Image: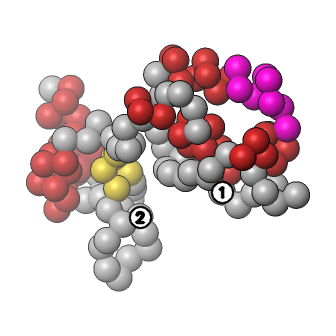
Amino acid sequence: NKHLPYRLKPYGGSAYFCLAKKHVSYILRYIENKPDIISFFRHTFAPDEMFFQTILMNSPLKDSIVNDNLRYIDWFKRGVQLPAVLTIADVDNLTRSQKLFARKFDLDVDSKILDYIDKKNLGV
């Protein structure tokens, strides 16, 4: 059956997210009471981008969800495999973004950006 059980409306989002304890507790209780939800999502495309989002956005906690995964990711750079590897040239955009996390880095492409982040945040 390819229809969501329990008349749930489907929601999707990033596989990278942060949850408060109340959200985690709700999800755990939900799957304990309705374990077949796991079976449904086991056979869907990108379940890591829909499972948690669907449960929470159909819950009484939906108004406490913030649509921001707190990550700086460059999906727009042309001519490169996406998401783009961040380099020292991205420092200004990264800093202005005020995001807590970033993706993606590659020491073989540019280690200077990681040195900059270490120095700015850790003083090393």
Neighbourhood count class around disc 2 (C-alpha, 10 Å): few under 14, some 14–19, many 20 upward: few
Q: Which element is circle 2 on? A: loop
First reached walking from the N terminus: tag 2 or tag 1: 1
Please state, as top left, top right, bottom left or bottom right, where the N terminus lies in the image: bottom right
Q: Residue at x 61, y 18 (%)?
A: 25
- Count the marks: how many? 2
Q: Magenta segment, which residues?
A: 29-36
Q: Residue at x 19, y 41 (%)?
A: 98
Question: Which residue type does callout 1 highlight?
Answer: Ala
In this view of the protein, which residue sits in the foreground, 70 or 30?
A: 30
Q: Is residue 113 magenta?
A: no
Confirm or deny contact between disc 2 and disc 1 (CB under 8 A). no
Please tell me the numbered disc located at residue 46.
1
Please tell me the numbered disc located at residue 6.
none
Residue 92 in picture, x, y percent from top left: 11, 54
Q: Which residue is mark 2?
A: 83
The quadrant in which residue 73 appears is bottom left
